[in-house]
Amino acid sequence: MDATGQSELVRAREVKPIELVEAAIGRAGKVNDELNCVVTPMYDLAREAAAGALPEGPFEGVPFLLKDLMAAYAGVPMTFASRFLADFVPDHDSELVVRYKRAGLLTIGKTNASEFGLLPTSEPVLFGACHNPWDVRLSTGGSSGGSAAAVASGIVPMAHANDAGGSIRIPASCCGLFGMRPTRARISMGPDIGDVMSGLVVEHAVTRSVRDSATLLDATCGPAIGDPYFAPPPDRPFIEEIGADPGRLRIGFTVTSPTEGDVHPDCVKAVRQAAALCEEFGHDVEEMAIELDTTMVTQAFTAVYCAGAAWSIEATAMMSGKVLEPHLFEPLTWAMHEIGKALPAPDYLLAVSALQMMGRVIMRLFSVYDAVLSPTITEPPYELGRFDAPEDNPLVGLLRAANLVPFTAIANFTGLPAMSMPLYWNEAGLPLGIQFTGRYADEAGMFRLAAQLEEARPWADRRPAVSAGWRAPAD
């Protein structure tokens, strides 16, 4: 069952929260040695919480996992997948974790990620590689790869994720899940953070069902005291959009990379099939191109991204009281720290302005289209080690990553909502995500379309090679 289904059992008193927790822990025990997705077990804490009084939230008693990045849980290590923070333990919950607890979720552990979330894979030196349950030789994507592997393999029905350049949608694509990146500032990062990388980063989750994503967003969205800005509130709960008529949408689709790189034929085929499916529903669909100043976007995004890496490292050093030691960081992470730290303040602000300028170019598309359809990433799930780099050139991995994520990064610098949907599996049996990007603050429209497509091309009965024994729901 998805998280909604499990919570319904709890409310009907057909199952106890402790039974759901023990079942999830048992499933983790079956697959985690092979997948390496849960890196910090919180089993005893979850058992203790399940035995007590739980809030009557929408996910009362449902087991959950946190990505080991940004979501602070008091008394539990938060490492950012870095050896530098291997022994750091926060003394308070982040606002998002407070809301997860209020929703009734029971966190059973933390999941693997790339160091500081910088790469679209989950292979940190601290924890070792996370393996894709569809083919363990392949990457889960990243940086929320541990969360995606845990959900895809059936340990939990959904898990926390966050996204600076595609880190919700990339692993959703690689692992066959639904991944919604909400509108910028839809979910608070308080109390410690206002925004990250001038708004590139958002919080949410990877889920097995569309309705779980909508309900979880209802439970976690909205500003907290002191937030510097926040997204406009929705007209009604997002869950009410599930099953609602999306209307006749104008959808533009593209199979051409906006940065002029190659797009794998499987990804092209997947998008064209999705476009045809949308036409079957009566939507107006036409092929188009996303035209950007490639040089400007690449240079500006890289500047903001490296400055963000430097900020993250400096901020966590201050937060933890630790002295920076370069040998405790992976070469790419430290190289990005050095680049970001050396970036003059005017150059940083010029990079932000350039991304805002390009954002206006993208926004003009939505005077014509209700949604833009594209590949999530430019190729099917890729081999582990793809982003390894020689010691004398640690930035090679970052350059390779840029060729993979030209479609996802657009939502990050524009602040638009975007979702990856598992509508296509290739001949090798691997999932390929399809991305829809929507109008600013229009997650509602995205959820209506997603629910329509999920009903037409359901994926709940697809199980990966490494599965924790979960069963597909009966028709």
Image: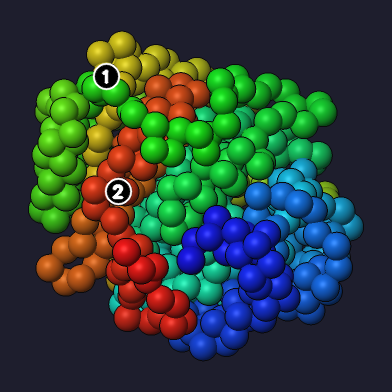
Q: Nearer the viewer, residue 378 or 49?
A: 49
Q: Residue at x 39, y 58 (%)?
A: 177
Amino acid carrying mark 1 in the image: Tyr
Residue 261 screen position, x and y as percent: 20, 43
Which image quadrant for residue 39? bottom right
Residue 435 screen position, x and y as percent: 31, 42
Q: Mark 2 — residue? A: 455
Q: CA distance from mark 2 to mark 1?
A: 23 Å
Residue 407 screen position, x and y as percent: 31, 39
Which image quadrant for residue 24? bottom right
Residue 347 screen position, x and y as percent: 54, 24
- Residue 70 visible within the image: no
Left/right placement of residue 175 relative to residue 145 reads left
Crowding at label 1, few (<14), some or many (≥20) Cα neighbours within 10 Å? some
Q: Residue at x 81, y 68 (%)?
A: 49
Q: Residue at x 69, y 67 (%)?
A: 13
Q: Nearer the viewer, residue 294 or 18?
A: 18
Left/right placement of residue 214 relative to residue 78 reads left
Q: Residue at x 49, y 61 (%)?
A: 2
Q: Nearer the viewer, residue 276 or 109?
A: 276
Q: Nearer the viewer, residue 181 or 112?
A: 181
Q: Are marks 2 and 1 in contact (CB under 8 Å)?
A: no
On screen, residue 411 above or below 158: above
Q: Mark 1 — residue? A: 369
Q: Earlier in the sequence, mark 2 or mark 1?
A: 1
Q: Can you say which quadrant of the picture contains the C terminus? A: bottom left
